[in-house]
Image: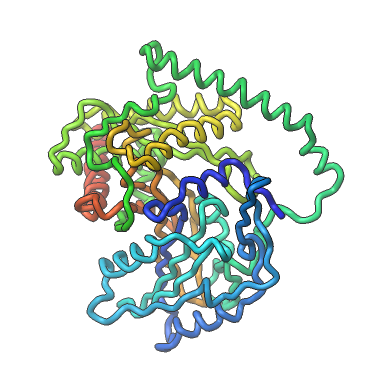
Amino acid sequence: MKKLSLLDLAFFVAESEASPKHVAGLLIFKKPPGAGASFVKNLYRDYLTASDVKAPFNRVIQFSLSAMPSWRTLDKVDLSQHIFYDRLKKGHNDRRALYAFVSKLHTPRLNRSRPLWEVHVIDGLPDGTFALYQKMHHAVADGVTMARWTAQGFSERADDMTQEPIWTVSHSSGGRTRFKDEMMKSVWAQVASNGKRVLGIGRLAAMLLLESVTLTKNAIALPFVASADTPLTGQVTAGRQFATAAVSMERVNDIRERTRSTLNHVALTCVDAALHRYLHDQGVQLKRPITIQMPVNLRAEGERSVGNKIGIIQVELSAPTDDPYVRLRNIGFSLRNVRTMIDSVAPEAIESYTLITGLFGQIAEMLNLSKQLPPTGNTLVSNVPGPKHPLYLRGARMLEMHPISTLPPSNLLNITLFSYAGALYFGLIATNELPNLERLGDYVVDAFGELEASVRSAHS
């Protein structure tokens, strides 16, 4: 059996019918030339025969009153409980209908009595396209890990007809361990880790104290100071809606080169502008910067561990401004300082900080007080790097990869960035209470065009 980490366990503790804790992806494909009408149905049937299920897709969660929860490996997995065929009806199969259908698939919790994953093969889309929707509990994998596993299941060549479904490839970092590996998990190693954790938390506390008395600026944004008077925060309820936006990586890179910015700088500038415009539509005019919760990858370079190894910190975006270039500079300044802070603190401390701040938000949600208490941040925005080159499934080219995440306590909106094959995708998931989500996606694209024009004007 494999025991859960505290962070993995937190996703189970935080889960409810109103707030399920799984992450997902919507993959859209173009059928290969000459593919028959049964191409998608045959793909589904073949998936059902791929019965050699590997870890972690053959594990169920097991809770105990006397010990930490752990994963138990099953001898056999019934794929009919995990792989499904869905066909949209003609006339109700456009992009909006697809997103509405995926929203319904994303709403319910995964059944804890079986391995926590599902794959839906979606047929009936126009123009020779079809889709895969696949979701997995966040305790099994974070977004970065899931993106890597997904890419491993496809080919980089259109003429490669072989396939390795994601559940047939072993992704476990476990197995038999040697004596040396056991020594690495000894009491002394744990003591060293706890020492780093305590020292790091002390350093973070000092940074937050300096920030609270305005002796520093943007070392790390303070939690629980974001404005609660917006439609972006409140009590998370059941029901989901999904929208997307996309921009060309070629255009993104042009801005990056002209301004010496990172992809995060450019993307968050567009998100910030879009959120301000969206809030203005709702009659909300913020006087202070929007505060986002931002996941950070805590894995060492080259580390391929399973489960979650992320932290979530608060980041202040730009002070309200109508100048896109000024907004870009402000966000760049903030993110550079945050990066310096993260690099100066042990990963164990970031994990502990994430658990502590998340606990307060979770208690408020469980007590139905999220509307009365200040939110940790206005929304959560994450960035997951994806494959740079096109991927194929039995000759079918994957056209788009859209991330679909989960909602943290008190946040009614989550935005995930995902780069794939020359495009940057923005996946927006929200409760049904958030009005006009599709319009927010349009505003992201509009904000990018305004930033592009501003940068070119400044550098002409």
Q: Quadrant of the C terminus?
A: top left
Q: Which is more toward the observer, 127 or 226? A: 226
The image's colouring method is rainbow
Residue farthest to the right? 179
The answer to which of 248 and 152 lies nearer the viewer is: 152
Q: Tell me residue 244's x, y (percent).
A: 31, 56
Total numbered labels? 0
Quadrant of residue 432 in the image?
A: bottom left
User: Residue 130: where, in percent of width, then height?
Assistant: 39, 75
- Residue 41, x across and y down, in percent: 45, 84
Q: Nearer the viewer, residue 47 or 412?
A: 412
Left or right: 211 with respect to 442? Answer: right
Left or right: residue 451 versus residue 162 is left
Q: Does residue 273 appear in the picture of this structure?
A: yes
Q: Is residue 163 above or below residue 239?
A: below
Above/below status of 150 relative to 6 = below
**Which quarter of the rendering shows the N terminus?**
bottom right
Residue at the (55%, 31%) spot, across then down: 352
Query: What percent of the width, then of the height, locates residue 100?
Result: 29, 65
Nearest the eye: 259 or 106: 106
Which residue is drawn at the image coordinates 63% and 39% (left, top)?
300
- Residue 257: in sight, yes or no? no
Q: Is residue 412 above or below residue 75?
A: above
Instruction: Say which residue appears at 43% left-offset and 33% top-offset.
Output: 360
Q: Is residue 178 left or right of residue 326?
A: right
